[in-house]
Image (spheres, rainbow, N blue to C red):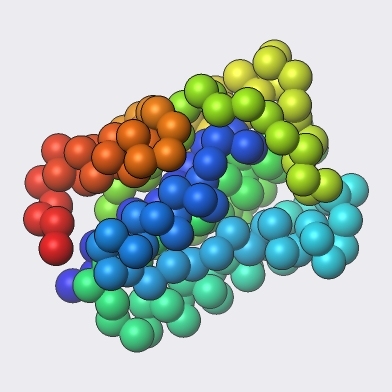
Amino acid sequence: MTRHICLHGAESTGKTTLASRLAARLGAAVVPEYGRSWCEANGTDLDAGDLLAIFEGHVAATKAAMAQAPAWLVSDTDPLMTQAWAVMLLGERLAEIDAWEDVADLYLVPALDLPWRDDGTRLFGSDLARRQFMDLAIGELERRGLRWAWVEGEGEARVQSALMAIEAANFLLP
């Protein structure tokens, strides 16, 4: 049985770095952030069609990773973040994402305790926009009643915070 952990939350909170560090600690497979790859290739002027393509990319990448039956899978975001993007950018929810049900076992939400950095794909750098985006992201988890936990700190402290959250969820660590 695969234990699926997903990093979730606002931009520039260290999700990608944390995903790779957690994967190394857990011996996990990683599903990279599909939206980042999409935006690097196609730009950040996203419409509903783009967000649905990102959604489908997330789903396909996760299915491919799950087909390998890893003990642990760490996703650097998933379609629930794409839905938060839809609300933030378009002011609407996408029905296809609302119908999606293959959620992770646990969502880890890195706090807004790291500085925002523009990497060419990020859009919401002001404190107000970051908070609004984080509220939307958490709202996606809460509306579905999913298990989630905050992750805080920098560097190794952030990794330890994530591992403690995984243990608190009663997942046995390798």
Viewer can see residue 109: no
Q: Residue at horizontal 68%, vertical 29%?
A: 116
Q: Where does residue 136 sit, x and y in percent of width and height?
A: 57, 29
Residue in front for this viewpoint, 85 or 113: 113
Picture quarter with the N terminus: bottom left
Q: Quadrant of residue 35?
A: bottom right
Residue 91 lies, with reference to residue 26, above or below; the image says: above
Q: Quadrant of residue 130?
A: top right
Q: Where does residue 141 sit, x and y in percent of width and height?
A: 42, 37
Viewer can see residue 166: yes
Q: Quadrant of residue 151?
A: top left
Picture quarter with the C terminus: bottom left
Residue 61 lies, with reference to residue 169, above or below; the image says: below
Q: Where does residue 126 sit, x and y in percent of width and height?
A: 75, 19
Left/right of residue 64 with respect to residue 56 in the rendered view: left
Residue in front for this viewpoint, 156 or 170: 156
Task: Specify the farthest residue to the bottom.
Answer: 68
Task: Specify the farthest residue to the top.
Answer: 128
